[in-house]
Every structure is written in C-alpha cells, then in structure tokens.
Amino acid sequence: MKRMIASIALLTCSFAAHADWKLDNDKSQLSFVSIKKNEVAEINRFNQLEGTVDTKGQAKVKIHLSSVNTNIPIRDQRMQEHLFKVNKYTVAEMTASLDLEKLGKLAIGEVLINEVLTGELDLHGIKKELSAKVVIARLAEGKLLVTTQEPLIIYAQNHKLAKGVEKLRQIAQLPSISNAVPVTFVLHFSEAK
C-alpha cells in the first residue's frame, strides 16, 4: 500500500519535477487570417515553429517568419520581403508563463478551459504584452496541448507592419487589407528526453 501511494505521489508531481518540454512542430500550428476587400478572409499559417517550456514554467515559441504559407508562392515571397522583412527579422517570439504546479495536478485526459495566459510578443524588435484565453490538456504522460480558446487579435501598427500591409495592398491592387489580424494556435509539447 505504501508503495502504491508513493507511486501515485510521484506521478502527480512528475510534470513539474521533470526537465524542459519541447514543442513538436509536426503536431503544432500557428494560423492567421488576412482580410482583404473588407470581406474576403484567407487562412494562412507558419510552417516552422520551435519552442520550449522550462522547469519554471517559462514558455517560449519562436515563429520562423520565412515559413509563412499562404498557399500562393508569390504571395509568400511578397510577405517575406515587404511585410515581415525576413532578411532583417528572421523570427517572432511569443513568451508566457505556465503554472506547472497546477498542470501537474491534471490527470491524463483532463482539460482546463478558460485559462488566461499572459505574455509578450516580440515582432520586428517591438515587444507588446498580450493575453490569450486558452485550453490546456494533458494528453498523456509527457504530452501537453495548449490551444487558443479565442483568437488573438494582432494589430499591424503595433509592430510597425502597417507600411508593409500597405505595400502588399498596392502590389496586389486591392482596395483594402485589414491591419487587424486574428491569430490562433495549437501547440503540442513533449517532455524533453
């Protein structure tokens, strides 16, 4: 009986006690919606993400800006050059703090909803605080899912991207492209071995 209680206690605290966690790019996605002509919405994404959660619960996710994927190669190239300026800014970085003690109490298969993560987005060298309502699930031993419950809205002007948006509008000869961009993410983390 003592051995069983000890085993349960170890399983309960194992989440917080183990080493870093690593983002699984193949099972993760960060998407954004661009809106042109006031009513045409297009879903885009970044193909390359990397991230970690350290033993203190500090989460970092790097978004490789050159991996933007709109399903139209020439548009990808224009975004890289005129909007994201990937020759100067290679990544954007999101940081946030996770409560590992709280997550360590999650049973496998258990889900937390309405969790609010506060953190920071560093895009084009400009850091802005952000807050996201997320769903967190413990999928299995050593597996964690963090996904947006509601989209984040990123404003181009907050990161000096409005001129790039305008340049894209001119090139495509569009009447408008919105500077407000809804963003969603699905992030799978695995315990680093």
Image (spheres, helix red, strand yellow):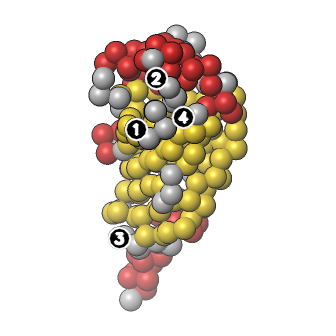
Residue at screen point 55% across, 30% down: 92
Q: Amino acid at mark 1?
A: Val
Between label 2 and label 3, give the one nearer the viewer.
2
Q: Earlier in the sequence, mark 2 or mark 1?
A: 1
Mark 2 residue crowding within 10 angstroms, few (<14) / some (14–19) / many (20+): few
Residue at the disc numbered 2: 174
Residue at the disc numbered 1: 40
Is 99 in front, or is 166? 166
Q: Earlier in the sequence, mark 1 or mark 4?
A: 1
Is 23 in front, or is 134? 134
Q: Position of residue 187 (x, y in %)?
A: 42, 48
Q: Amino acid at mark 2?
A: Leu
- Distance Cα–Cα, label 2 vs label 1: 11 Å
Residue 178 - label:
4
- Distance Cα–Cα, label 4 vs label 2: 11 Å
Residue 115 visible within the image: yes
Residue at the disc numbered 3: 109
Mark 1 secondary-structure assignment: strand
Residue at screen point 45% across, 17% down: 173
Q: Earlier in the sequence, mark 3 or mark 1?
A: 1
Residue at screen point 61% across, 31% down: 156
- Distance Cα–Cα, label 1 vs label 4: 10 Å
Mark 4 secondary-structure assignment: loop
Q: Amino acid at mark 4?
A: Ser
Between label 3 and label 1, give the one nearer the viewer.
1
In the current view of this chain or complex, which residue is farthest to the front?
Answer: 175
Q: Are marks 4 and 3 in contact (CB under 8 Å)?
A: no
- Distance Cα–Cα, label 4 vs label 3: 39 Å
Q: Amino acid at mark 3?
A: Gly
